[in-house]
Amino acid sequence: MNNAEHLSSHGRQLLSRRDFMRNTGFSLGGLGLAHLLAAEDPERAASSDKAPIRPDINPDRPYAPRGGHFNGAARQVLVIYCPGAVSHVDTFDYKPALTRLHGRKPPGIPAVTFEGPSGNIAKPFWEFKARGQSGKMTSGLLPHMGALADEFCFVHSLHTQTSAHPQGENFFNTGFTMEGFPSFGAWVTYALGSDCSDLPAFVAINDPRGLARSGKNNFGSGFLPAAFQGTDFNARNPPANLDRPASLSADDDRTTIDLLKRFNRKHLERYPGDADLAARIASYELAGKMQTSVPEMMDLSGEPEFVHREYGTDNGTDLKREYAKNCILARKLVEKGVRVVQLFNGSDPSGGNGITNWDSHSNILKTHAMQAEIMDQPTAALIRDLKRRGLLDHTLVVWCTEFGRMPFLQSNGTGRDHNPEAFTCLLAGAGVKKGFSYGESDEFGFKATVDPVEVYDFNATILHLLGLDHERLSYYHNGLERRLTNVHGHVLEKVLA
C-alpha cells in the first residue's frame, strides 16, 4: 500500500521537491523581511524581547505595597472620568475657524455621522479667553477648571477606535472595546498593591446618579485575581454589609473575629500551599478593618467650613452638592494612601442624552451647562486641595472622557454628535509638565493631526509615570500575554516633566 495515501494534502505536498523548495523559499523570505523591518524600527525589535515582569504577590497580603519596574514620578493616581463625551471644542480645544465658518458646511465634512445627517459648523457655545501665565485659551463653560490652566498638561490629539459609549468606556478604561478585560485600576493595584492597609487598594467613586454605561466593567478585575477589582462606594452610599448587626455586641464581634483567626491559622498550617484560601482570608480581614476605617472616611463633618465652601457642598443643585462630597471623599482617600481612586462625573444606566451625563445630542447649551455646574467647582477645588496639602507631588491626576464631539451640529441644529477622531484629556501633578499642550487637532477640531495620540499611548504614559513598563506588565490568560495596551502603545515622552 502506498503510505502517501495516509498523509494529509499538506503532507503530500511536502513530498514534492518543487513544493518543498517553494515553501522553504517563502519561509526564508519571511525571516529576511522580519530582519529588515527590525533594522528599520529598533524600538519595536527591542520591545519584542521584553519578558513579562510578574509582581511578587504574597497570597496572605495581596494588597501589600510592591515596587514598580523602575522609580516612577507618581505613587498614586486619581482618575476623574466624565462619561458621555465632553465637547473638546466647547471646553479646552480653541478653534477660531469655527467662529469664522459658523453656519457653513465646508468641504470634507461627512454627510452622515453616528446619529444621522450632519448640520453646519457651529462656533463654541461659550466664549474662550486666555488663562493664567501660560495664556491657555479655555472656555467660560468651565471657569474654575480654566483658572487652573497653568497646572494642566493638555493632550489635544487623542483619538479612539469607537464612537459608541459602552465600547468607548471599555476601551478607555480597559484597553479593549469588548467586556471581560481588567480595568486600568486593577492592572495598577495588581502590579503595585497599596500603601494603605485598612482601605481597598482601588476605590471607584460613582456618580450620585448611578453607574456609567459600562457599569462595573470600568473598574472590574477581568481575568486578574478578583482581589484587584475596584471597591464601589461614594459619599452617599458606603460599602454594603460593613455594619455590625444590632443583635451582636462589640465584645461578641471581637470574640468571633479572634475565633475565626484561630481557625483560619490552623487551616493554613494544614494546607500551606492554598493560595486561594489565603487570598480569601486576606479579603475578609480587610473587610474587618474597613468596619472602623470606612465610617471615619465617610464622615465629612470634621472638614473645616472653608473646605465645604471651596468644594461647593453648600450651594448649587443637589447633584452638585453630592458630587462635591464625592470630591472631598476622593481627597481623603488619596490622603490616606489608596493607590487608585477613580471618580465618576456622570452616569448612564439608560441613555442619558445630556441629563445624566455629558452626551449632548440636543440642546448642548443647556445640557453641557448642567453637567458643568455639577463638575467644575468641586473638581477644581479637589485639585487645588491636593496641591495645597502637597499630595500633587506624588499623585497623578487624570481628567478624561471616552471621545469628543463634532465641530458641526446635528441636523436638529442644537446638539453635537460623537467624534472619535479628536478629543482632549488633561494630566496634572506628579511627573508631567505644567501649562503645556501636546498635539493638535485640525483647524475645526475634527481630526487629530499633529502628534496623534492613541488611547494605548495615553495609558502607556500613565503606567510609565507610576513606574510601570506597559510592555512588561502582562498576565498570561487563555494562551496569551495580555496587556492594558494590547500590543500597542508608546510613552508620550514630551509630556514628562
Image (cartoon, helix red, strand yellow):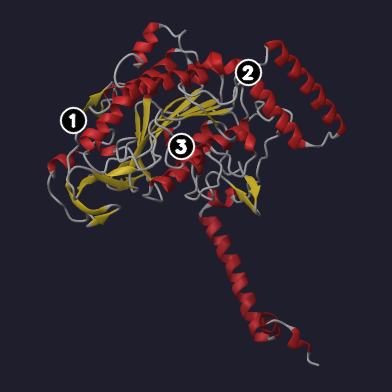
Q: Position of residue 98 (x, y in %)?
A: 18, 42
In 3D space, how far apart are the residues under numbered discs 1 and 2 (Cα atoms)?
A: 53 Å
Helix, strand or loop for disc 3? helix
The number of discs equals 3
Q: Amino acid at mark 1?
A: Glu
Q: Residue at x 25, y 38 (%)?
A: 89
Residue flagged by tag 2: what amino acid is it? Arg
Label 3 CA crowd tier, 10 Å (few <14, some 14–19, many 20+): few
Q: Is residue 181 visible?
A: yes
Front residue of 411/348: it is: 348
Q: Position of residue 406 (x, y in %)?
A: 26, 46
Q: CA distance from mark 3 to mark 2?
A: 50 Å
* Separation of marks 1 and 3 at Cα, in angstroms: 32 Å
Residue 244: numbered disc: 2
Mark drawn on residue 320: none
Farthest bottom residue in view: 1
Determine which of the numbered discs, if any, sits on residue 493 in the image.
3
Identify residue type, mark 3. Glu
Rendered image quadrant of residue 220: top right
Circle 1 residues within 10 Å: few <14, some 14–19, many ≥20? some
Q: Nearer the viewer, residue 474 or 378?
A: 378
Going from the N terminus, do you reach mark 3 or mark 2 first?
2
12 versus 310 height, above or below: below
According to the image, label 1 marks what residue?
Answer: 127
The image quarter in which residue 296 lies? top right
Mark 1 or 2: the one toward you: 2
The quadrant in which the C terminus is found is top left
Whole-percent x and y of residue 244? 63, 18
Q: Residue furthest right?
A: 270
Q: Mark 2: few, some, or many residues within 10 Å (few <14, many ≥20)?
A: few
